Image (cartoon, grey):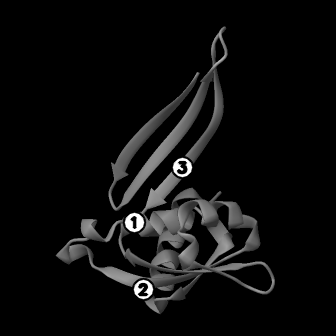
Amino acid sequence: MVFLFWEVECCQTVVYSKCYTIFWTGSGLRLLNWQLNLKFPQEQFTATQSSHQIVLLFSKETAYRVYDEFDTTQIEYQKIGDLMVRAEMPVDTWLTGYLLSFGAQVEIIEPKYLKGVLAQEAQEIYKKNKP
């Protein structure tokens, strides 16, 4: 007997769902598969949180995350294996933290001012944590 279990959660501007496929073996349950889907729904943006065209260049080492977290229509494969992502997203503290989670594996192409926002946050982190 096979069971499907869905879990849906919202976190600021991200809605994600997880689907688990579980199999009853007769002596217990066994996880066969699971899938995670992230969406950035436009209807969640407010007047104070307007969306902007964001263009990001990810190193090929982060391909697994990029393909998990962005729609394939937003991803453009580059010659050397890197990935260019074009997405409409609000520029807020969540986005800053999200981009910082990629470390040096992401470069902001547009908007240019976002580079300064990210650099300032990284500098503040360094100041608080320098040896």
- Mark 1 neighbour density, 10 Å: few (under 14) some (14–19) many (20 or more): some
Q: Which residue is mark 2?
A: 53
Q: Which residue is mark 3?
A: 36
Q: Which image quarter: residue 81? A: bottom right
Spatial separation of the CA atoms under disc 2 and disc 1: 13 Å
The amino acid type, in three-letter code, at marker 2 is Gln
- Mark 2 neighbour density, 10 Å: few (under 14) some (14–19) many (20 or more): few
Rendered image: mark on residue 40 = 1
Mark 3 vs mark 2, foreground winner is: 3
62 up-or-down from 26: above or below: below
Residue at x 37%, y 83% (from the top left corner): 52
Circle count? 3
Label 3, secondary structure: give it. strand
Choose the circle earlier in sequence order: 2 or 1.
Answer: 1
Q: Nearer the viewer, residue 72 or 48?
A: 72
Q: Nearer the viewer, residue 101 or 75?
A: 75
The amino acid type, in three-letter code, at marker 3 is Leu
Residue at x 55%, y 62% (from the top left corner): 69
Choose the circle earlier in sequence order: 3 or 2.
Answer: 3
Q: Nearer the viewer, residue 18 or 123?
A: 18
Rendered image: mark on residue 22 = none
Q: Which image quarter: residue 96? A: bottom left
